[in-house]
Every structure is written in C-alpha cells, then in structure tokens.
Image (cartoon, rainbow, N blue to C red):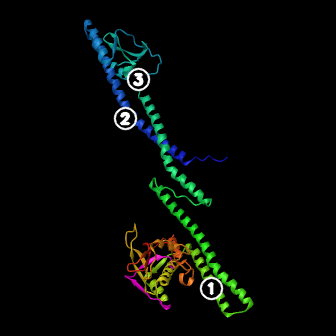
Amino acid sequence: MSRRRYSLVQQNAAMLALMFLLFELAAAGAVLGFLMLPIARRSADDLAGLMVLAAQTWNELPPQTRADFEAELAQSHQLVLRPDIAQPPDDGRRHRPYLYFLETALDRRVGQPSHLGHEIVAGEDWYWAAIPAGERRIGVGFRHGRTGTDPVSAILAWLALGLFSVLVVAWWLARRISRPLADFERAAASVGRGALPELLPETGPRELASLARHFNDMARRVRELLAARTTLLAGVSHDLRTPLARMRLALEMLAKKPNPALIARLDADVEEMNRLIGALLGLARGLESEAATDIDVAALLDELAAAARQGGAQVIVRVAAPMHVLAAPTALRRVLSNLLDNALRYGAGQPVELACENYKGAGEEDAGGCRIGVLDRGPGIPEEQMEAVFLPFHRVEGSRNPATGGTGLGLAIVRQLARANGWEVRLAAREGGGTAIRLDLPARHRPT
C-alpha cells in the first residue's frame, strides 16, 4: 500500500499551524502562570479580607446602625450579610478556580477551614461564607456576577480564535509560497512533453524570483536553440542544394564527354560542401566542456595575428600590460579566430586591431577580468542587424556566395561558445567607421 503524499500547501499549512499553536500554548501558559493566577489570588485575598472585615464590623456596630451599614455594603461592594448562619456543608460542587482561591484566603484569615455555600436566588447563583465574629457566625454572600470573570474560558476562546486565524494565515502563506512552484512544475512538465515553455512571473520571495529568472533564461535558451535548429536545417538544405545541382549537371556532362574543367568544378563543390559540414560540426560541438587553464592573452593574440599576417592581412596587436586569464584554451582560441576571420573578411582591406584591457564586471571586487576587442574599419553593420548576425546562416552580405559572404556560421559559433563558457560577446559600431566586437571574460572565471 503506497504512502499518501500531501501537497506542499498542506504540509506548510500544517507545519505553520502547529508552530503557531505551540507558540499560543506557551504564551497562554506564561500569561496564566505569571499574570492571571497571581492577579486572581491577590483579588481573592482582597475579597476575603473585605468579607471578614465586613462581618466583624457589623458585629461590633450598634444594632440601630447595622441596617445602614448593610445598605452601604451592598451598594458599594455588592456584599450581603446574614446574621447567625451555619457553616455551609461541602456538597461536592465544583467551583471555578477563583472560588477555590477565595476559600483558601478565607481559611488563612479566619484560621479554620471555610467552604463556600451555593444557592439560587431569583434565578441567579449566590455564594455564602460563614465568617466567625465573636460568639456567632455571620454569613457574607455575593452574586455570581460579582466575580463573573472566567480566565479559563477566556484562554480557551483565545486559543480557538488564534488557531482559526493561524490556519487561515498558514494556508494563505503556504499558497503564496507554493503557487510559483506549481507554475514551475507545470512549465517544467511542458518542457518534458517537448512544448515551448512559458515564461514565469519573476515575483514573490527572493529565492522564488531567482528560480523563476533562471527558468526563464533556460526557456529563452530553449526557444533560441529550437529556432536555431530550424534555421540550421533550412540553411543546410539551401546551401547544399546549389553544389549538389552543379555536381549532378557536371556528372551528366562527364558521362557524355570527360572535361578537366568539370572535374575541377566537382572538386570545388565537394570542398565547399566539406567546409559547410565542418562548420556545422563546429557549431554542434560548441557546448563541449573543456578544462580551464592559465592563458597569456598577449601571447595568444600575437600568435593569431602572426598566422593572419602570413596570409597577407594587416593585424595590429595592442595590449596595455601583461595579462593572464583562466579560461578554456581551445574555446577561446576558436572564438578569437572566428572574430578575426570575420573582421578580415568584412574589413575592406583595412588593418584589424586586436586589443586587450582590464575589465571588471558587475558584482566583481577587482578588475581581474579581461576584455578583448576585435576592431575593424569596414563598412560596419546596420543597427537593426547587430543581434541578427549571431543567428546561424545570417549574412549581412546579401549574396549566398561563400567566397564573399562565408557560411554564416562564424558568429553563431562565437555566441554559442561564449555562452557555454560564461563569457559575454557584444557588437557595436566603431567610432570613425567600422565594427567593434568585444569579448568579456569575467575575473577568476571557471567554465561550468
């Protein structure tokens, strides 16, 4: 038989209600023990003293003044006297705690056991005590309404009201906490079913808002990956169709008459397809993890610039001071190589500058990070396309010719590698013309 599982709302509500109930019981015990019981004993002792004093005073007064004294006593203190009353018997009737305190106080003041008698007069409860005065016993009585306070009932009513309030508040708090988690559960379930996750409201307590924010980041990343997959498949089908058509035509022509030019074209088409497939594999491998090592940034930039100069490019390296970063070496080299190739391709033959400076990101205590810039003097990128250039197969250059526009995967690989390693790549127009791409590596960063 499976064990019943309670919801988070039920568990939190029960836990909060139990904690509040224990707190109320402790508070009620403290109030009862340190406040109400001492006050009740003191009040009972005062009443006992007044009853003894009233009986003794009445006994000592002249007979002609006793009626006035009884009237004043009844009006001012709500006490009634009965001369020559017998000691009330203990009939086993249970009194309220206050009346037991009163009996104890009377015992102490008269020096002998006292018991309160009970009777009903005109539908109202009366209590009587036989107070010794001289050679006689004088009955002193009072109505139930004179000591009508009932602290036990008051405490029980307080506990009942408090428990009801606690249950309502606990249920509301539990719902407030669990509602975002329920939304998160539904969103996660939708992801498990392969649907696009809906963004969650980033509200509520700090931890839940942070959880919603991270989930929304993941949801946006999933949407981007799905969009990139669609674009990738469409781009592959488009870019492979042209060389395949040329290859089919060349094969038909070769079947009729061999021609070295056709063979060379076939070889070029195969190389173009191989280059495209290599770029796609590079994009697919973008999320592979790699151990971080200490990298000399100046040496890496000099190495990349030297390789580019061998091909006739003009590359300038500017590093203000020796700088080392902790990063994945292959990923960093690949990112910088793609950025440099992109700058050389669209730099209009002008020198490309590789720059490096200290960088302090948000929340960092020192400037231990590194900002690497790849700066060109090409025609630049329109403002509305600065984010789109990071999408697979997007080309600012309008043609589909790989010789002039590339495969359209270079910056997509850069963005994917940067995100996988916790770096940030930004693109902006360069003052004086051209494009500036900056790669920020946070201080003491270690890839996850």
Q: Is residue 312 a member of the stretch shown in magenta?
A: yes
* First reached walking from the N terminus: tag 1 or tag 2: 2
Q: Which label sits in the foreground, 3 or 1?
A: 1
Q: What is the quadrant of residue 69 in the picture?
A: top left
Q: Start and end of the magenta stretch?
A: 309-329
Q: Is residue 206 a member of the stretch shown in magenta?
A: no
Report the front residue among 134 and 349: 349
Q: Residue at x 42, y 15 (%)?
A: 124
Tag 3, which secondary structure? helix
Q: Residues within 10 Å of mark 3 (few under 14, many from 20)?
A: some
Q: Is residue 200 left or right of residue 361?
A: right
Which residue was labeled with disc 3? 100
* First reached walking from the N terminus: tag 3 or tag 1: 3
Report the front residue among 368 and 342: 342
Measuring from the top left, give residue 99's x and y in whole percent: 40, 22
Tag 2, which secondary structure? helix
- Mark-to-mark CA distance, 3 and 2: 18 Å
Amino acid of disc 2: Phe
Report the front residue among 58 and 110: 58
Q: Residue at x 33, y 17 (%)?
A: 78
Q: What is the quadrant of residue 185 in the picture?
A: bottom right
- The label shown at residue 271 is 1
Q: Residue at x 73, y 92 (%)?
A: 257
Measuring from the top left, give residue 338's x and y in whole percent: 51, 80
- The label shown at residue 34 is 2
Q: Residue at x 49, y 48 (%)?
A: 176
